[in-house]
């Protein structure tokens, strides 16, 4: 169960009912299945956006569901040191812990419902690892890493972080209290999440009870993506089937509708609903860099090699003893 949960949904603020007389549901234009792979030094991921054209994802670029995995002792893995430039990495830890360090000497812990919103901007090096205690003992690891593009005017900005703590997340219920809506960034019916974004974006994690449905008013100028973390459901005007690891792209309409297709079991439908105002600029993406032109990508690789995005701080350059 997600670390940020609510015992009694009747006690938190509700989102509005949609206006059935005038509002139309968004329609599903594609449903794709995220292939499984491995990231960094070998932690399991699902590539949520694979198979969807970039223009439909805009302003998002890439998303990995990390886990969900219950590690045995010795199994937890992270990433080596690597650079980023030209976009933001958003790491949302649903359950478990990730530790990070960066080339400015900064670092911290992201755990159990916290989000790290990193604006890589002009460039930064970082490393993401499980803490020693998790490596030794094993444990639950489940999170999201979302890449949010930056408009050209912001690609050369100074790197910065926002640490969003579990208690900062805006918690809302559907009108019949059948769904919990966590607003990490953006807003629903005037209820605003803690994340500050460079362009307008909604980032929601929604848990829908068996047999329940949710209808969320959605800005007309935002794209809309529904990704299933776990469970089975139906989405959009045509009630398209979705299940674990599937992504629905929705267009048109005034609200996003999702229902849990399981009526009698205990299984909640856990989904992310993402959307934003498209940036509509050319995207040149290679490895850890997201720029506007091929030339800027070449420059990024050159600048990285020359240490212009920073270097690994000396305290981390000694190799760790074999465990
Ligand atoms: Mn990274």
Image (cartoon, grey):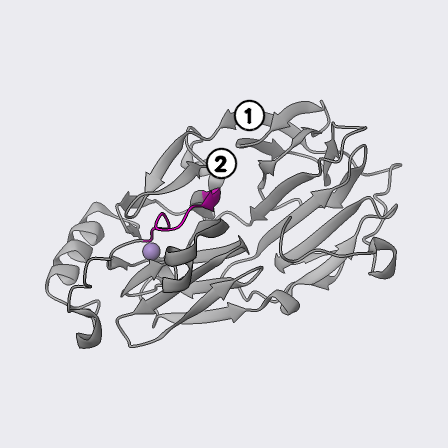
Side (left or right) of 280 relative to 106: right
Circles 1 and 2 in contact, beta carbons < 8 Å? yes
SS state under label 1: strand
Q: Residues within 10 Å of mark 2 (few under 14, many from 20)?
A: some
The residue drawn where x is 57% and y is 31% is 244
Which residues are drawn in magenta? 65-78
Disc 1 target residue = 30
Q: From the viewer's perspective, tell me whether residue 275 is left or right of residue 301.
A: right
Q: Position of residue 65 (x, y in %)?
A: 47, 43
In depth, the one of 199 and 213 nearer the eye is 213
State the residue position of label 2: 56
Q: Position of residue 125 (x, y in %)?
A: 26, 64
> Crowdedness of circle 1 by 10 Å Cα count: few (<14), some, many (20+)?
some
Which residue is found at the position 16% from the left and 54% from the top? 301
Q: Nearer the viewer, residue 203 or 67?
A: 67
Looking at the image, tell me whether mark 1 or mark 2 is earlier in sequence order.
1
- Looking at the picture, does residue 86 appear above or below residue 34? below
Mark whose residue sits in front, 1 or 2 = 1
Image quadrant of residue 235? top right
Q: Secondary structure at mark 2?
A: helix
Between 258 and 167, the one lying in front of the other is 167
Residue 103 sits in quarter: bottom left
Determine the image quadrant of residue 319.
bottom left
Queried on whether the Cβ of the residue with tag 1 lies below 8 angstroms from ligand 1, the answer reads no
Residue 44 within the segment the image draws in magenta: no
Name the spot of residue 321 as percent of width and height, x first. 18, 63
The C terminus: image quadrant: bottom left
Residue 219 shows in this picture:
no
On the rendering, which quadrant does ligand 1 occupy? bottom left
Q: Can the viewer see residue 156?
A: yes
């Amino acid at each position: 169960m997600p670390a940020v949960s609510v015992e009694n949904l009747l006690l938190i603020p509700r989102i509005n009912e949609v206006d059935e007389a005038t509002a139309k549901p968004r329609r599903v234009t594609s449903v794709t299945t995220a292939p499984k792979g491995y990231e960094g030094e070998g932690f399991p991921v699902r590539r949520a956006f694979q198979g969807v054209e970039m223009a439909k994802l805009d302003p998002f670029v890439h998303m990995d569901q990390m886990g969900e995995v219950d590690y045995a002792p010795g199994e937890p893995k992270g990433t080596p040191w690597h650079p980023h430039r030209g976009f933001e990495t958003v790491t949302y830890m649903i359950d478990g812990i990730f530790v990070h360090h960066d080339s400015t000497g900064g670092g911290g812990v992201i755990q159990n419902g916290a989000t790290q919103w990193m604006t890589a901007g002009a460039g930064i090096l970082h490393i993401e690892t499980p803490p020693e205690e998790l490596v030794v003992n094993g444990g639950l690891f489940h999170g999201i890493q979302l890449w949010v593009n930056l408009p050209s005017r912001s690609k050369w900005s100074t790197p910065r972080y926002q640490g969003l703590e579990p208690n900062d997340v805006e918690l809302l219920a559907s009108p019949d209290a059948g769904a919990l809506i966590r607003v990490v960034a953006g807003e629903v019916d005037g209820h605003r999440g803690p994340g500050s974004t460079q362009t307008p974006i909604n980032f929601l994690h929604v848990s829908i009870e068996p047999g329940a449905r949710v209808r969320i008013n959605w800005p007309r100028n935002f794209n809309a993506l529904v990704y299933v973390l776990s469970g089975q459901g139906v989405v959009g005007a045509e009630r398209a089937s979705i299940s674990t690891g599937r992504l629905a792209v929705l267009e048109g309409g005034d609200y996003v509708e999702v229902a849990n297709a399981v009526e009698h079991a205990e299984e909640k439908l856990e989904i992310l609903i993402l959307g934003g105002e498209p940036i509509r600029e050319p995207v040149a993406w290679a490895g850890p860099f997201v720029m506007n032109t091929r030339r800027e990508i070449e420059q990024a690789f050159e600048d990285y090699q020359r240490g212009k995005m920073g270097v690994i701080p000396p305290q981390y350059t000694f190799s760790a003893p074999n465990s």
